[in-house]
Image (cartoon, rainbow, N blue to C red):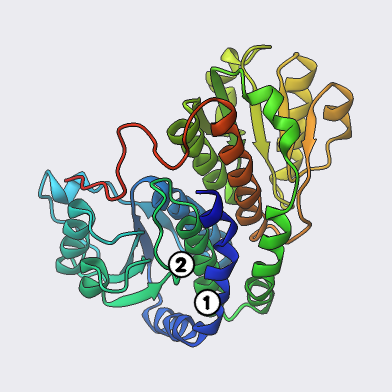
Amino acid sequence: MFREAASASDAVRAQLRARRAITAIGADLRRLAPRAVITCARGSSDHAATYAKYLIETRAGVLTASAAPSVSSVYGVAQDLRGCLFLAISQSGRSPDLLACVSAAKRAGATTLAVCNSPDSPLMAAADLRIELCAGAETSVAATKSYLASLAALLGMVAAWKEDAQLEEAVQALPGLMDDSWALDWSRALSVLEPAEHLYVIGRGLGLGAAQEAALKCKETCGLHAEAFSSAELRHGPFALLDREFPALLFAQPDATRAGVEALAAELARRGVPVLVAGADTPEARAAGAIALPSVDAGAEAVPILLVQSAYRLIAALALRRGFDPDRPAHLRKVTETV
């Protein structure tokens, strides 16, 4: 896990060498002009789909929603997806329910796009359009470099689709920024997380998928019960559980959501909640005892990628500190074949 997470920037470099293919996908999407985008994924790939939702809706202005695979794979219900883009994201491209959803989406009139790390997979063969993640073989059960490569591919796709020079610049800068993020020291968080039984990981907007991914990795590799919430949704009930024995890890990016995340960090710290915060300048929260984790300065669309890169290094170390082998999570296997 550690080695593969460290090498994620190389996958993005490989994508940049194959940039022409993603540029062509962008032209296809401009011709299609989809009325909506439907994402379909499981696990870490679904967290990438969360990022895709906010990225597409904020930069392309197109409604984006997550498909419920059981609607087609279990209930067998046909939907009207004419004029829609069906975006399937997968590391392996072999999960039966994902393949069933792609097949159903094509029958329902959608154009299907696969974002996948396995070029010879059934998913890539079934899709109308294809983006290869270029991450190479990933042997760790806990996906890391393929997740980060998914985010980079999605960022590159939207940049090409909208011919957005700012996003294109962000894509080109990503590998170096990812290397810088991997080198950051988040070890101050270990003393908070090693004894913890529960954790909330909190983000909002473009950063919500990063929070979801960090929470999943804490569960599967560290034996730490972690749940992800939007900073807004946290106040609808889950807020009540946080106390001195229940820490919170907050992610922020430099956009309209950051002020709210910073305010939440300060409020929780004043309540005595152990607070870790990355991606924000939180002097009020630090004054109340919050721990600020270092982050690389970048645009809002890139920061969630960089925060997860740093979080992976922390989580790999945390797993060992808690007595777990991050490369052999209990009861899990590499390809999960849900139906």
Dot placed on the residue nearer the N-terminal end, 1 or 2: 1
Q: Which residue is mark 1?
A: 14
Residue 275 on image: x %, y % = 72, 26
Residue 165 on image: x %, y % = 67, 79
Relative horizontal placement of residue 34, taking residue 189 as reference (left or right): left
* Element at label 2: loop
* Residue 220 placement: quadrant: top left
Tell me which amino acid carries mark 2.
Answer: Ala
Going 39% across and 36% down the picture, which residue do you hit?
329
Going 74% across and 46% down the picture, which residue do you hit?
279
Name above or below for residue 199 compared with residue 245. Answer: below
Tell me which amino acid carries mark 1.
Answer: Ala
Going 71% across and 20% down the picture, which residue do you hit?
274
Q: Which residue is mark 2?
A: 135
Rate crowding at label 1 as few (under 14), some (14 to 19) or many (20 or more) other CA atoms within 10 Å.
some
Choose between 146 and 23: the one closer to the eye. Answer: 146
